[in-house]
Amino acid sequence: MVTEIGDLEDKLARARTGEEAAFFELWQQLQPRLLRYLRVLNCDDADDIASETWLQVVRDLHKFSGGEEDFRRWLFTVGRHRAIDAARARQRRRSIPMAVSYDSVADDDMVEDQVLHALSVKKAVQLLSRLPVDQAEVVALRVIAGLGTPAVADMLGKSPGAVRVALHRGLRTLAGDPAVHALAAGPGRATDRSVLPPAASPRGWTCEQGPAR
Amino acid sequence: MNRDLLDDLDEFAPGDMALRVLMSTLESAPTPDELVGQQAALAMFREVHTPVRPVTRRTQAPARSRARARHRVPLHLGGRLAIVSTAVAVFGGFAAAGYAAALPAPLQHVAYRILGFVGVPDASHNAPGTGRSGHPSASGPGATSTGRGPGSSAPGSPSASPTASPSPSGQGSAAGRLTATLASAQIAAGGSVAVTAILTRHGSAWSQAQLSLQELSAGQSGWQVAASAATGSGGQATLTVSGLTTNARFRVSGPDGTVSQELSVVVIPPVSLASAAGSHHGSYVLTARSALARRNDVVELQVLSAGQWRLVRSRRLDKAGLAAFTVSFPKVSTTYRVVLLASTVHGLSVSNLVTVVPHGHGNG
């Protein structure tokens, strides 16, 4: 079952007038996507960042004018900025960056515990997060946020061509990853260990490592 | 999956079902843990979009809070949001715990306690209703009652002794539980509010019990009884208040100190936009009017441009509820509207559309 995000216009209009039920439906449709995007960026405090994101969106909703994609772009832009803020705050708090453990990602037992239905959203997000960050973020914004190439380019400050290149590289890498094929085959397969290395030197930024300076 | 993304998949991994499954999984339906914070999000929305209540004194409030309460200064949106932001920084920490341990109710409670401190009056949960009662007529599983009608004055306020803020869920004695729901959380000014309450005792319907609907209107400092009714055989009663012209909170109280959660109602006042030729050649005057809004309420003139509404300028309503905007005659037909921004006493309201056409084309 796919979460549709094509009918947000009406909910958005009603939420802008203060209608709680409409906001609730908006939140239900977009919060899972926002969380997945933040987790692709390796934000382990994704829930906190999402809460701060929604606070800003709720606060400024009356000023917002635009359509459905504008709203999604705004939401994910705010989320990205809050994630960058969180990463910077994290950097200030510690002098030694914590190593990111990817071992648990491929732990069969853990995957099995967390699998919902045959396919695990969490596993899929983790697979995506192993891509180089610039590719992972582009794929996440295109697939999870449902944004078009121009919107992603505008959001990331890249050219549309650069976004397409990053998308294609990311898709090509994922297509060659046995863990992606194992995910499609179902949980618990012996081959669901990814061949992708941890993103040791990501281009761009992650919640763990902070924005590039 | 959108079309050009499918094209990308076809180009780089034709027929690769695994990649398609991965993409579908990434945009699949929410998992339960992704929706853990929904009550907290709703509480946040309510705090920002529902009436800003006057600050009243808490029994154990610190000195600074008491001083502010003495002056009865309503916290207007800007200042209040700064407090909300601070609160959410604390609240955010609990959100992470909520993700891990699935704690929606505590999350909501924490959010309510933090955000509610800004302005929730701490009236007693079991304040006796001494105001005018409605006319209960138990029938079937529930009973209905109607309170204040249009133009009537509010009844006297019952005494309300400060205690802890009520939790969002229904409360009462260990045996009794009272829950309340609204037919609509948003009504047109002058409309009616219908609250349906269900009273249970030891998990079973509690019939023939007297319930009071208490109202806290924006700008008021105490709860007032707006209607009362007895529960029917199903432990249910519907209490109605009509002629509401300002935002308000409602709760229902019953026997044995039972009290429901608070319910917020946002009132939407009408706002209109009219046009007339301006006094200067080449200008046009657009006049916004909202009889039920208040002086200094803000209206925004917006113009429709490339399918999107964009702010032209803002004005404050005068004491007659009017605000005038002078615009130049456009070169092409241009459509305007005004938006009355939400205030402490009403919700956001949008006017009719007015189209200004170039000279010689008449006006729409």
Image (spheres, rainbow, N blue to C red):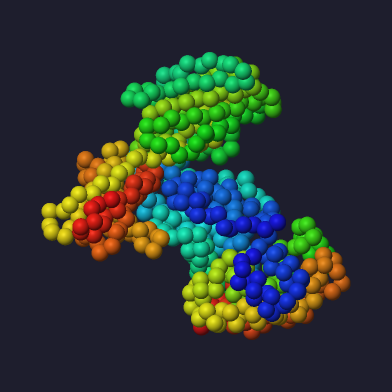
One can see residue B159 in this view? no
Residue found 32% across the figure and 55% down from its top: B335
Residue found 64% across the figure and 84% down from its top: A201
Q: Is residue A179 above or below residue B193?
A: below
Q: Is residue A203 above or below residue B106?
A: below
Q: How many marks?
A: 0
Quadrant location of the N terminus of chain A in the rendered image: bottom right
Q: Nearer the viewer, residue B28 or A20?
A: B28
Is B323 on the left or on the right of B251, as rendered? left
Residue found 46% across the figure and 28% down from its top: B214
| Residue A198 locus on image (x, y percent) | 71, 79
The answer to which image quadrant residue B66 occupies is: top left
Q: Is residue A157 above or below residue B67?
A: below
Residue at the extreme left of the image, as rendered:
B280
Q: Nearer the viewer, residue B191 or B40?
A: B191
Residue at the extreme right of the image, as rendered:
A190
Residue found 60% across the figure and 72% down from its top: B4
| Residue B22 locus on image (x, y percent) | 72, 68
| Residue A168 locus on image (x, y percent) | 64, 80
Q: Nearer the viewer, residue A79 or B314?
A: B314
One can see residue A17 in this view? yes
Is A198 on the left or on the right of A151, as rendered? right
Residue at the extreme front of the image, as rendered:
B360
Q: Nearer the viewer, residue A96 or B208?
A: B208
| Residue B15 locus on image (x, y percent) | 75, 74
